[in-house]
Amino acid sequence: MSEFIDEVLEFIDPLFEPAFMIGSIKALVIAAALLGVVPPLVWLERRLMGRFQVRLGPNRVGPLGLGQPFADSIKLLFKESIIQSSADKFLYHLAPAVVVFTAIVAFAVIPFGEPVTVFGQEIGLWGANINSGILFIFAISGMGIYGMVLAGLSSNNKYSLMGGLRSSAQMISYELTLGLSALSVIVLTGSLNLIDLVQNQSTVPYIFLQPLAFLLFFIAGVAETNRAPFDLPEAEQELVAGFHTEYTGMKFAMFFMGEYINMVTMSSMITLLFLGGWNAYGLPLWPILAFAIKVFFLLCVFIWLRSTFPRLRYDRLMTFGWKVLLPLCILNLLVTSVIKVL
């Protein structure tokens, strides 16, 4: 009996160590913040699109329509969840969870400020600091496509299946551009660590050294997050609502939660790779505030693009990815490598 108690105590003791407790608290805070940022982003998008398109956004529920996201959330929480009798129940429920889970986990290695000291304990403003942070984000975010494919497959709806399949084709195509664009920056820094990337931009951001890589990464990032004009996985005019046609209520909302969280992650990645991260470059700003301003600006650009450009035709979307963006990425990577060696 005493040996069993000793084994239990040996297992429990690490859970009370400061490092484990701080890591757990950071994980909960990051997850809560990402889930909490979705309703304000929805409100911001609707208000900005109203301004861009010279019309009113939400303005009835609360001042400036601020109560609209809460009203929508309550509606989705209590809306009836309808499932086809022929659907695969397990995969049907699993798909939206995969989309949200991968979106949150991908943000875990995003550093958004310099370490701070609290009660004598240095705390890094990130979930985890790993040497291959860029590869981790690409790997986890790439797994999110499984949620879309499973949603289309499990619904037993041919339109949902077609939406899921072309979602995977789009993601695979534009992930090549995304990776090769980031590789040009990695060639300059010689590190996959995101903190090292920010520190190497302390004097000048890489957007001035790699303007083409920035443009290509941003375009591919818009396509990776399923945002207009690359939101073909949804394409309600052609496939009803794409891979989530058969979803209702909160499960339907979870796909959009994943989309908005991916927007935040992608904006953070662009900020870290090309805009200097939390470096303020002489401006009197706290590092975390400088980072937040850059991310907020990029989120507004995402919304601006949606309200400005029409949706591409699918064959032109794929042609643009394979015949325009990919060759430019390879060319930029070769030129950067040659300049680095010389």
Image: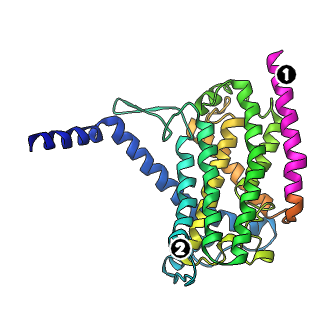
Taking depth in this image into account, of 31 and 246 the one nearest to the observer is 246
- Residue 31 position in % (x across, y down): 48, 53
Image point (69%, 36%), residue name: 273
- Quadrant assignment, res 211: top right
Residue 327: in magenta span: yes
Residue 178 sits above or below residue 79 on the image: above
Left or right of 127, for residue 319: right
Numbered disc 2: secondary structure: helix
Residue 326 sits above or below residue 153 on the image: above
Image point (84%, 62%), residue name: 308
Q: Is residue 112 visible?
A: no
**Circle on res. 338:** 1
- Residue 227 position in % (x across, y down): 74, 60
Query: Mark 1 Cα within 10 Å, few/some/many (few <14, many 20+)?
Result: few
Q: Amino acid at mark 1?
A: Val
- Disc 2 target residue: 250
Q: Amino acid at mark 2?
A: Met
Give the quarter of the figure containing the N terminus.
top left
Residue 297 sits above or below residue 278 on the image: below
